[in-house]
Image (cartoon, rainbow, N blue to C red):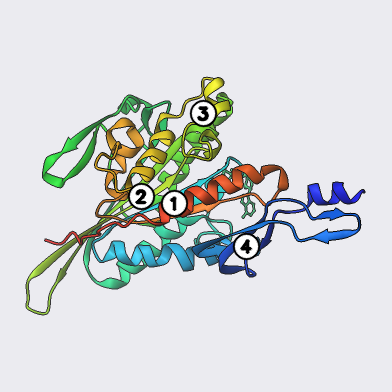
Amino acid sequence: RSEREILEGSPIIISTEGAKGQNITIQTAPIASVLGVVTLPPTRTYPFDAVFGPEADQAMIYQDVVYPMLDEVLKGYNCTLFAYGQTGTGKTYTMQGDVSLSPLGNPTAQAGMIPRTLFKLFHQLESSGCDYSVKISYVELYNEELRDLIATEQDGQSGLKIFDDASKRGVFIQGLEDTPVKDFNHALTLLAKGSQKRQIAATKFNDHSSRSHSVFAITVHCKETSSLGDDVLKVGKFNLVDLAGSENIGRSGAENKRAREAGMINQSLLTLGRVINALVDKSSHVPYRESKLTRLLQDSLGGRTKTCIIATVSPARSNMEETLSTLDYALRAKSIRNKPEVNQR
Ligand code: ADP
């Protein structure tokens, strides 16, 4: 192959400091060779709290990123984990992955963050000695329509409506099933059932999987007796969010021109970008109410929740624009400061 072909096909990620580090360096142009003098290609380095290279596996990401968040949920905080990135870069693999059981009844090596969180959650609760209950809900947002992924057809599952819940300073979804789960196997069965529903819709409609968002929410009540003999109830909530493909959004956080021309406006993803921009710019108006997703997750953005975004990127040169766009977006979101509060009664 010619030098040019090799460069065009070469990966653009030139460093992630091995399996994990804190910087990712992107080569933004091929090496230029003018009259035999090779000039160094322009690069851009992005600093994040953690960067995982291709060698990193699900267990490593869970241990470093998600397990510390579960600890906070058990202390009574609300936490949200987002997966953001171009379609095909591994959002669903990271969040969900394999939802089957290993022969020993554990999550498999390919299990994503949701099954691993459920497994560890029940393990921790069972050994904590506290009086606990766990509820889960699983919704999908497609074309600004909310759908319950756990309720059966007969329960009526689409057209769910979001209402403000003044007493809890949040929102609630009318008709959404918040299902009590007794153990890991039960929770995993419901996750698998919901994921299958998403998969069926993806097979039916071409753009469904790249344009739908899903929110898997775990609510944990844990009652303990303090050293003074009082009952203390801690309520923590964990939202695990698999967002629509970021290719719907352009570099500036506005709707991608091509997506707009094709009539594929993704209101929720567009508003999420605007909300992040408004929070970063400390603007007096944050447009949470302009989409279902931002309304649903208002508290996770600039609110009282501990929030983490996993940005997934492709190493291929042909995806460079999208990769830079995802990294710019994630870096911008990183400067938002939330004010987490514990839910204790
Ligand atoms: P997205 O949700 O961002 O559109 P997917 O999670 O569906 O992307 O990933 C696209 C494909 O790549 C899937 O077949 C998935 O199994 C595979 N994949 C993604 N990330 C990994 C990874 N880290 N290791 C192995 N396979 C992966």
Select label 3 or label 1 by which is in front: 1
Q: Nearer the viewer, residue 285 or 317?
A: 285
Amino acid type at circle 2 is Val
| Callout 2 touching callout 1 (CB < 8 Å) | yes
Residue 44 location, x and y as percent?
A: 61, 57
Q: Which residue is mark 1?
A: 332
Amino acid type at circle 1 is Arg
Select label 2 or label 4 by which is in front: 2
Mark 3, Cα crowd under 10 Å, few <14 / some 14-19 / many 20+, is some
Q: Which of the 4 image quarters holds residue 68?
A: bottom left
Structural distance between the alpha carbons of marks 4 and 1 = 21 Å
Q: Which residue is mark 2?
A: 280
* SS at mark 1 in the image: helix
Q: Which residue is mark 4?
A: 53
Q: Is residue 97 among what the camera can see?
A: no
Select label 2 or label 3 by which is in front: 2
Structural distance between the alpha carbons of marks 2 and 3 = 35 Å
Structural distance between the alpha carbons of marks 3 and 1 = 33 Å
Q: Nearer the viewer, residue 310 or 125?
A: 310
Q: Which of the 4 image quarters holds residue 157?
A: top left
**Numbered badge on residue 12:** none
| Callout 4 touching callout 3 (CB < 8 Å) | no
Residue 256 location, x and y as percent?
A: 53, 31
* SS at mark 3 in the image: helix
